Image (cartoon, rainbow, N blue to C red):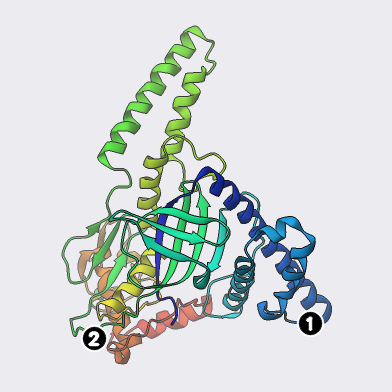
Amino acid sequence: MKADAGRKYRAYPTEVQDQVLVRWGHTARALWNVALEQRVYLWEQRRYTLRSVEQCKFPTAARTDLDWMGDLPAQSGQQVLRSLDRAYDNFWNPSHPAGFPARKKRGHRLSIPLPGQAVEVRKLNRKWAEVRLPKLGWLRFRLSRAIGGTVRNATMSRDGNGWHVSFGVHTGRMPDVPNGKPACGVDFGVAASAFVSTETTPRLMAPSLKAKEKKRLKALEQRKARQITYAKKHNDGKYSRRLRTTDLSVKSMTASAKGAAEAPGKNVRAKAGLNRSVLDNTPGERRRQLEYKARMYGSVLVAVPPFHTSQTCAACGLVDPGSRKGRGRLFACTRCGYEDDADHNASMEIEARARRTGGSDINSTRSIPRMRVPATGRRRMREALQPAHAG
Ligand SMILES: [Zn+2]
């Protein structure tokens, strides 16, 4: 019974719980770093691979000597070591993009992992539920969606938006039977849109700021401009305390999605919305969601190497950057004269490649891992893409 879905909820610890969780978070981080160091040392000195099963005895011993180590629930410490196992596994797996396990720095998001057996969840009403953590008691969280399965593991985490509780859930939901629907190619734009080969217009992503957020941002910008004018006129251009506050608000609305955990700022809600829309536009997240949602609806996702899809003619297969030259959004083939919206042409090419590479598997639920084609491979691929009947 493995966890096959993730659920993340906003958690609302009491002040006391918050203090304990912060302490645990740093202990878990320190344990990760020490455990990583021990594994690196053993490998370098004795070519010995240490796994969590064996490494578990060290924190157990340390718990009696170090107060702060004994404070962290034992199951949590074991879970940290198991996560380290997984970090190593991902690093060794050639089709996984992960690098060598990294040390966790002080400013990073805090995270306290727990196995499913250590926690208990109960629903309070339609909107609220509680999770019982070892040593900490019941902790409230906002039940924004149903859990819908058995809790296999739980993680308390804190980032710029505050505390969250995430559950790994076993839903038991099987992949749907193949739906037999026709295939289509999708070309994802850098940040803005997706073009589907069977459609005539691009699908635009929702703008990153909502109308209300835009209005607030505009008002803040105006206030800032007014305060700067005043500062120049009466204050030798020196920022007043109020101007600094305004500037901070503007920055917090427009800054990158990385919130600082130590100083959450004032526009937490606006920032949360912004974070969400930034996440919606993140290629990796989009890909991850597509992959598991496709399974749920009986579809197959076939990833294809994207090289030169924008320069390849969907009609005759010629690869030529000249087909795009000076023509903006338009694709015009230099050989056969085929004309199309550049992104739509790319989506057609992507569909064709998917048929070539994953054609026989189109009815299975296999997903092809991300490919990394070296430069020489690219040339070979370009040659392979030239159709035999070209002339
Ligand atoms: Zn052509």
In the foreground, 328 or 266:
266
Residue 214 in the image, given as x and y percentages of width and height: 30, 36
Q: CA distance from mark 2 to mark 1?
A: 47 Å
Q: Is residue 44 left or right of residue 104?
A: right
The circle on residue 1 is none
Return the residue at label 1. 47
**Which residue type does callout 2 highlight?**
Pro
Q: How many residues crowd mark 1 within 10 Å: few (<14), some (14–19), many (20+)? A: few
Q: State the count of labels.
A: 2
Residue 223 in the image, given as x and y percentages of width and height: 37, 21
Q: Is mark 1 within 8 Å of ligand 1?
A: no
Q: Can residue 335 be seen?
A: no
Q: Residue at x 22, y 74 (%)?
A: 336
Which picture quadrant has residue 366? bottom left
Q: Is residue 107 left or right of residue 286?
A: right
The image quadrant where one finds ligand 1 is bottom left
**Image: 180 above or below 248:** below
Q: Residue at x 28, y 62 (%)?
A: 194
The answer to which of marks 2 and 1 sits earlier in the sequence is: 1
Residue 80 in the image, given as x and y percentages of width and height: 62, 68
In contact (CB < 8 Å): disc 2 and disc 1: no
The circle on residue 178 is 2
Q: Is residue 172 left or right of residue 257?
A: left
Q: Secondary structure at mark 2?
A: loop
Q: Residue at x 59, y 78 (%)?
A: 89
Q: How many residues crowd mark 2 within 10 Å: few (<14), some (14–19), many (20+)? A: some
* Position of the N terminus by quadrant: bottom left
